[in-house]
Image (tube, rainbow, N blue to C red):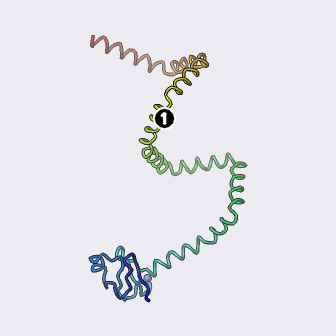
Amino acid sequence: MSKAYGPDKLTIDQMHSNAKEAEFAGHSHYFTGKLCKNGHIAPRRTKGYGCLRCDLLKHSKSDAKRKPYKEYYQKNRERILLKARQYREENRDVVKQKQKNYYQANIERERKRDRERYNKNREENIERVISYYQENKEKILQKRREYRRKNKEKIREQRRAYYLKNKERLQKKQQEYRQKKKETG
Ligand SMILES: [Zn+2]
């Protein structure tokens, strides 16, 4: 039996001889019988006109390149991961600096990626937070009350620090508020 191609399992003698006819018939492949630019006589894809023999070679070439490393990695996975971890621990500052450099060098792209990730998860995150709050409302409020009771001094201190840091802004806001109130009566 001769080889069949595509989801419609056509042999080359069942295929149309040009892309247009193949497309019209809903076939995924066609066969011209002519040489491709790399000298193959093989079916081609209706979408993109690619020669199947070329595709096959392209893929097997990159597979051949990847294969040795993949095998090496699989055999030595534990050792490689351990080594990487050791390196990271011993060179924490270098690694950190490198990551920072990378981020800086690719800042636009990284920012865009962060933004996309954030936007993608935003709705979900909000939903999650709200439903968590609703389900655990009592527990959360209880915890908050407890925290406030235990950290009265700390909270007062934080409030004072915040006020001092934002004094001008807060006073201005207050003034504006008073002014507005006066005007509207
Ligand atoms: Zn080809």
What amino acid type should be assigned to the residue bearing mark 1?
Tyr
- Could you say which is closer to the camera, residue 95 or residue 13? 13
| Residue 161: % across, % down | 55, 20
| Residue 72: % across, % down | 67, 68
Q: How many marks?
A: 1
| Residue 61: % across, % down | 54, 76
Q: Name the quadrant of the C terminus.
A: top left
Classify the position of ligand 1 by quadrant: top left, top right, bottom left or bottom right. Answer: bottom left
Task: Read off the residue under disc 1.
Answer: 132
Disc 1 under 8 Å from ligand 1? The reply is no
| Residue 85: % across, % down | 69, 52
Image height check: is 102 above or below 20? Answer: above
Residue at screen point 28% across, 12% down: 183
State the image quarter where residue 182 is shown.
Answer: top left
Instruction: Categorize mark 1 by other alpha carbons within 10 Å: few (<14), some (14-19), many (20+).
Output: few
Residue at screen point 69% across, 66% down: 75
Determine whether, in the image, residue 178 is placed left or right of residue 77: left
- Could you say which is closer to the camera, residue 82 or residue 184? 82
Residue at screen point 44% across, 89% down: 1
- Could you say which is closer to the camera, residue 111 or residue 42? 42
Determine whether, in the image, residue 7 is placed left or right of residue 166: left
Residue at screen point 59% across, 70% down: 66
Image height check: is 121 above or below 68? Answer: above
Q: Secondary structure at mark 1?
A: helix
